[in-house]
Image (cartoon, rainbow, N blue to C red):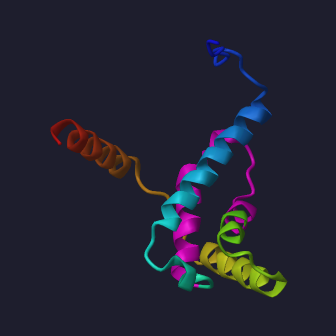
Amino acid sequence: MTSLDLSFVKGSSKLVKAEKLEVIYNAILSRVRVLPDVNNLRNNTDLIHLVCNLAENAIKKKWGQVDKKAFVIRVLNTLFTYNVVEKAQVEDVIEFLHSNSQINKVENAKKVYACGKNWLKKKVL
């Protein structure tokens, strides 16, 4: 039986937003899981900082209000299954990073350069 292509049917904006957030969620999880010895980084501030920066750069403003803090906690909780105390500690670290302007967006020029570099590597190699 042939497969049916229904890609032309679009869902509501809420469904599209949820689908995009799920793609970002899976991309961040796969990015973090390749880190060496990730299981020992359970309460590591650098790991939380990395996940916050990944979420900040992946989630677009045009999608409306997204609770990035809850999103980051969801990603980290999937990796490590935090208890209530650990989850509160992670929330405090995220608040600290946010209040001290440690969560930054990457400039568009750097994004374009990285994309171009990756494209060239694929074409040459």
In the rendered image, residue 21, in percent from the top left (x then y), is placed at 67, 46
Magenta highlight on residue 18: no
Q: Residue at x 41, y 53 (%)?
A: 107
Specify whether 40 is left or right of 73. left
Q: Residue at x 52, y 66 (%)?
A: 33
Magenta highlight on residue 70: yes
**Where's the C terminus, which quadrant?**
top left
Overall secondary structure of the magenta section: helix
In the rendered image, residue 17, in percent from the top left (x then y), is placed at 71, 38
Q: Nearer the viewer, residue 28 or 115?
A: 28
In the rendered image, residue 37, in percent from the top left (x then y), is placed at 47, 80
Q: Residue at x 84, y 82 (%)?
A: 84
**Where's the N terminus, which quadrant?**
top right
- Quadrant assignment, res 45: bottom right
**Residue 92 higher or lower than 26, as above or below:** below
Q: Nearer the viewer, residue 110 or 24?
A: 24
Q: Residue at x 71, y 60 (%)?
A: 71
Give the extent of the magenta segment.
Answer: 44-73
